[in-house]
Amino acid sequence: MKSYIIRRVLLVIPVLFGVSIIIFAILSLFSPEQRAATFITDVRQLRDIQGVIRKHHLDAPIYMQYFSWIKEVLKGNLGWSKTASRPVLEAFFYFLPNTVELSLFSAPFIILIGIYLGSTAAVHQDKSVDHITRAIAIIGWSLPTFWFGLLLLMIFYGYFKGLFPPESLGLNSSLYVNSKDFMRFTRINTIDALLNREWWIFVDALRHLVLPVITLTVVQCALVMRIMRSSMLEVLGRGYVITARAKGADEKTVIKKHVRRNAMIPVITVSGYLFAGLMNGVVITETIFNRKGLGWWWWRAAVQLDIPAILGAVLFNGVLFVLTNLVIDLLYAYIDPRIRLG
Amino acid sequence: MRELLKVQNLKTNFYTYEGIVRALDGIDLDVKEGKTLGIVGETGCGKSVTALSILRLILPPGKIESGKVLFWYKGELSVDLLSKDEVFLRRVRGNEISMIFQEASSALNPVYSVGEQISESFLLHQKRELYKAIIEEIEKNMREDNFFLKNFVYRFHKRIYKKMLENSKSLRIRFISLLPLINRYKVWLKKEVSRRVVDILTKLGVPDPQRIMERYPHELSGGMQQRIVIAIALACNPRLLIADEPTSNLDVTIQAQILDLIRRLKENLGLSILFITHDLGVVAELCDYVAVMYAGNICELAEVRKIFKNPSHPYTKALMNSVPTLEEKKLESIRGNVPNLISPPEGCRFHPRCDYATEICARVKPDMVEVEDNHWVSCHNFLRG
């Protein structure tokens, strides 16, 4: 097990190198002038673009450029984002907490509800429970996010007069949160509110989370549910399930101990990618609910051709998926002993 | 000779999209205590379905339609397993009647170690015995080691196990079992169970059982996996073992070893076995009685010697002729194909392939007749005398 973990972690290094090569290749598609835009933070610099190009070696041979680029990336210098009016890295950490908060709250709902519905459907295969859950899942999966989000807003913000508002915080609480009395530990509203023991802010942040979390859960949990169901059905037909029954185990033990653990493996893969997908910003959900997270920022960056921000997004996605894969593989090894040796 | 299991007129159907598959069409079987009954027949004739139906392990779309499975529970009165509830059946499965399966590699759960899978049998059926043994063990330790702090812990653990003996699902115990350090009492259970696992593995001739029980199924050879499956089945000293082609996926040498193991178990433990196979050689070697199955029916049932000396049913005869012998003789095959069980032939299910078939065979299903002592045949040729 230990050697497997070490091997798997070391494998991350070449993969990250590959990711950096691909991103640099994308960057190299632009002319030196276009790339110089990354370093321009002030209109006055425009007078001497050639100077900027020379200063940052944008006309040097390509491998030299790669080294100077990767040096800057490792230093954390990803250029200037004009949509956020601050350096890309700083903007990234400014927007990240909102996205993390949304992912942390919606991922457990999506995954647990998906697993529960999927295994219930599989256990009662072809009975009414199965048909109903499958129908719900298909309906949820087919709902367009923007439409469903707007519908929820219409009902719970419009009809019920601001019961669950959009954005990430109300006016009063956001003023208080940004004042000096409030310590920002993580910049994640709910956690900071708990750490500061300001319950009303915590409740306010939760109220703002309800609708986006519902939107994401309804739309995304169909995938987890379908995969859990099919993988449960496959495992239910295996020999060891009959062995477990022939041993005299009751149905609950058979399902919980023998079936579910074996059926979890494909679900873990999907859940990992799902979480990664949530983390790199659920663009539409964040835009609809006007939560200023990564997706919201990248949507605006894409519209305004903010190249440094987009490249930052690509870099972040690459690293995120590599790390997600790492975690998924380690979880596999925990669940399935056959993988530990492989 | 005492009866152990009696199957009467067992019918099992599978409701598929193509139609109703009549997999078992009125099976009658008898297993006597300490004897081995072999069921032979070709693939798809319903041997495995019979085994699964006896333990009521048939899953939908399969359904047991009618019949009786009488089992002499605890050696006293016969109970009909098909009319009992799930809870009773769970007590019988693995405890009184065990089963071993065709493919050992798929019969073992890949994510649990071999030891865990064997100990599950003990934990399911022998909790009380385990607790009693543990209490004795703790008392022994108390006598040997009377350092007062340790003694205090021993006394606490003994109280917990006594409590569990009374009511293993009491809320207080469940609460305690969640507390770290205090739930160290579980170590006793673990030790006792693993001692028993080592015991049973040693009995089955597994070398180095301590090491093997830490292993996962995929790390073991096919023969070893089959031994583990047998260990799971025999963990609770069942009275009847149903072996569903336990050797069909093994190399010939390993087959011989497993058969040898089963024979030794039969002799040493007085185990009754229902042995399902398609191999007549294995039947001749291992069984006391044989039932020949064809398309969901038993066509011949006899003592093993009688059936080899005097095969009476046309199907049995044909089956014997299609087995290679040492003499140089042309091997014969049975003409035609196994019938489709969705629409099986009327009357005797074998008549389309039978050389002796007459007009009545296509209309009436033959009853069993005793042609000689302990030798039953279901064929019209004998009915008419």
Image (spheres, coloured by chain):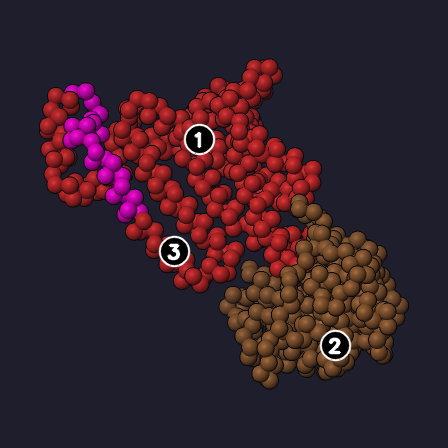
Let me know if marks 3 and 2 both belong to one chain: no
Give me the disc on residue A282: 1
- Toward which corner of the image does residue B200 lie, by quadrant? bottom right
Secondary structure under badge 2? loop
Tell me which residue sits at (56%, 40%) in the image. Answer: A226
Q: Amino acid at mark 2?
A: Pro
Q: Is residue A316 found left or right of B167 in the rendered image?
A: left
List x then y, in percent, for residue A253. Answer: 67, 55
Q: Residue under circle 3?
A: A8
Against B196, residue A204 (above or below) is above
Residues shaded magenta: A16-44
Q: Residue under circle 2?
A: B311
Q: Nearer the viewer, mark 3 or mark 2?
A: 2
Circle 2 Cα neighbour tier, 10 Å, few/some/many (<14 / 14–19 / ≥20): some
List x then y, in percent, for residue B140. Answer: 71, 77
The answer to if A141 sits in the magenta stretch is no
Whole-Å distance between the Cαs marked 1 and 3? Answer: 29 Å
List x then y, in percent, for residue B103. Answer: 59, 65
